[in-house]
Amino acid sequence: MKTYDTNDTICAPATAMVNAPIAVIRLSGPDSFAVAGKIFQPRKKDLRFADIPVRQMTLGQVEGGGNAIDEVMLTRFVAPQSYTGEDMVEISCHGSPYIQQLILQLMTDCGARMARPGEFTMRAFINGRMDLSQAEAVADLIASNSEASRRVAFQQMRGHFSERISGLRAKLLEFASLIELELDFSEEDVEFADREQLQQLLDEIDNEVVQLRESFATGNVLKQGIPVAIIGEPNVGKSTLLNALLNEERAIVSEIPGTTRDVIEDTITISGVAFRFIDTAGLRESKDAIEAVGVERTYEKIRQAAIILYLFDVSRTGMEQIAQTIREFQEMVGDEGKRLVLIANKIDLLQEIPHHFRNLVDLETIFVSAKRKENISMITDSLVKSVDSFTHSQEGILVTNSRHYEALSKTAEAIAAVRKGIDDEVTGDLLAIDLRSALYHLGSITGEVTSDEILGSIFERFCIGK
């Protein structure tokens, strides 16, 4: 990891370097005011830079080499009341990339350096403006592509997840301290930490850790988009249905069976939730090597999907055939938590909807004509309802970050080791090792304990200027 020197003054564009009405350029660090004062001239000639009101926009112009570069608005932030916790300046200029480059060049000529990816947020973490999980939530908020992912990221950025983790760690730290104290009096054979109370605390913490770990399945799909696989035999209208759902010609439609030989994916947002629709190759045995690979990929995507739309041609499929196919499919998937919805397609070829399909199996069945786009809204309504029940089953905080999930898993392992040590009546020094491990992994989530390697891997994924 590159060393981040917080004694430097850094600068970067906080908005995209594209033609736009307005752009924002940031300065942060000990010499921010000195650098900005050299290039900014307030409209009020008698206004000194040090007297510019804090957190209020001031009109003026950026000057360099005796020439006026642009008319701008400058905002001054005094440490620690800024995003980074340092003295900080934001300049709102006209959005020409050329003008932005000129201003940044003036800043670097006056002693600032260009910021690295994530360095502003890194400084906010170092200066205690936010913890590590909140910093990661900033990146998630920037990357959010739906109301659901925005809501989860915003909740974490506000510190709700951090508070819960810190609370768990504080409870465990109290007992760990007592165990450590026992080690200082090992010759006296005294016991400061009541083992029965410690077991109760471990049960409490373990229950919360398990709950948070289990929420990752929900949180991750809300963050990435809920995967929905469209499956069925060849030529039942899977690609036509995908096009109808996306409202565009995304997949090739043909009367020839086996046209879709690979997986096609696209994402749309419905009622604030992102869904990743996956059009798969038809489920059938094939001697065609390429098609066979597509079928294998279909099964792989089925295993990854949270919701499966099983499509069949209602005009030429018998009830027993469908029931048998679904039984085989459920045995193959072997996941009771995976939601399966039957989509009876091609109702436009029928005189009336066959009522016997409604009692086919204990599964929701929706009758549509993908070709005519009939009843497509019933599918989207069903998907939204499934997400509502999906999220309501996970009350409170959702874990969305795989690093947090891994840390929680290691915490659970360490707690299990402590519990086993108590049952086996091991010595306090051995209990202390596993307690320290649990504390370390909980602390790594919020950054109470961390390493340069972890920080580097997190912040290098940020955009420059954030």
Image: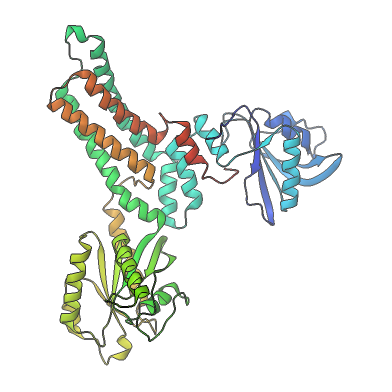
Q: Residue at x 66, y 52 (%)?
A: 17
Q: Residue at x 30, y 25 (%)?
A: 436
Q: Where does residue 78 sit, x and y in percent of width and height?
A: 62, 30
Q: Nearer the viewer, residue 51 or 167?
A: 167
Q: Where does residue 142 sit, x and y in percent of width and height?
A: 51, 50
Above or below, comparing residue 316 to residue 250 in the picture = below
Residue at the right extreme, as displayed: 66
Residue at the top extreme, as displayed: 188
Residue at the bottom extreme, as displayed: 351
Q: Say left or right for 354 vs 64.
A: left
Q: Residue at x 42, y 53 (%)?
A: 149
Q: Where does residue 179 sit, x and y in percent of width and height?
A: 24, 18
Q: Say left or right for 115 vs 96.
A: left
Q: Say left or right for 151 vs 10.
A: left
Q: Where does residue 35 sit, x and y in percent of width and height?
A: 73, 32
Place residue 115 in its image quadrant.
top right
